[in-house]
Amino acid sequence: MAEVRIEKSDDFEKALRRFKFQCRREGIIEECRERQYYTKPSQRKRKKSKKR
């Protein structure tokens, strides 16, 4: 899980930017989008083979 610690001197917007970057790097947002709709197992296999 992405986590960003904020100190008193840190700007909230910078911390939010770092958090979004961590989420993107860990693939959290992409996974949420994939799970938003049901995909058939055959479609998942096809998509997985295209990634490679």
Image (cartoon, grey):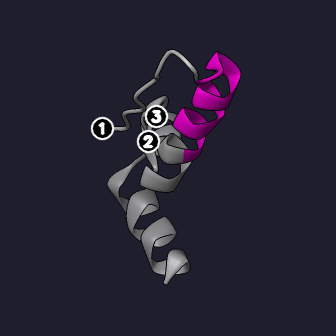
Extreme residue in the bottom direction: 52
Q: How many angstroms separate mark 2 from mark 1 (CA)?
A: 8 Å
Mark nearest the camera among 1 and 3 is 1
Q: Which residue is the site of mark 3?
A: 32
- What residue does disc 1 label? 1
Q: Is mark 3 on a helix, strand or loop?
A: helix
- Asked whether disc 2 touches disc 3, contact meaning CB atoms under 8 Å apart, the reply is yes
**Residue 43: percent from the left, percent from the top?**
46, 59
Q: Is residue 3 above or below residue 28?
A: above
Q: Which of 21 and 11 is in front in this view?
A: 11
Q: Quadrant of the N terminus?
A: top left
What's the residue type where badge 3 is placed? Cys
Front residue of 50/12: it is 12
Number of residues whose C-alpha sits closer than 10 Å to that of mark 1, classed few (under 14), some (14–19) or many (20 or more): few
> Circle 1 sits in a helix, a strand or a loop, which is it?
loop
What residue is disc 2 on? 28
Q: What is the three-letter code of the residue carrying label 1? A: Met
Distance Cα–Cα, label 1 vs label 3 = 13 Å
Dots 1, 3 in contact, CB < 8 A: no
Can residue 39 be seen in this snapshot? yes
**Crowd class of label 3 (few under 14; some 14 to 19; many from 20; radius 10 Å):** few
Badge 2 local density, few (<14 within 10 Å), some, or many (20+)? some
Percent position (x, y) of residue 3?
Answer: 37, 33
Q: Is mark 2 on a helix, strand or loop?
A: helix
- Tell me which label, 2 or 1, sits earlier in the chain: 1
Are discs 2 and 1 less than 8 Å apart at CB? yes
The residue stretch that appears in magenta? 10-21
Give the number of callouts.
3
From the image, give the main secondary structure of the stretch colored magenta: helix
Residue 7 on the magenta span: no
Position of residue 45 in the picture relative to residue 30 (left or right): left
- Distance in Å between CA atoms under marks 2 and 3: 6 Å
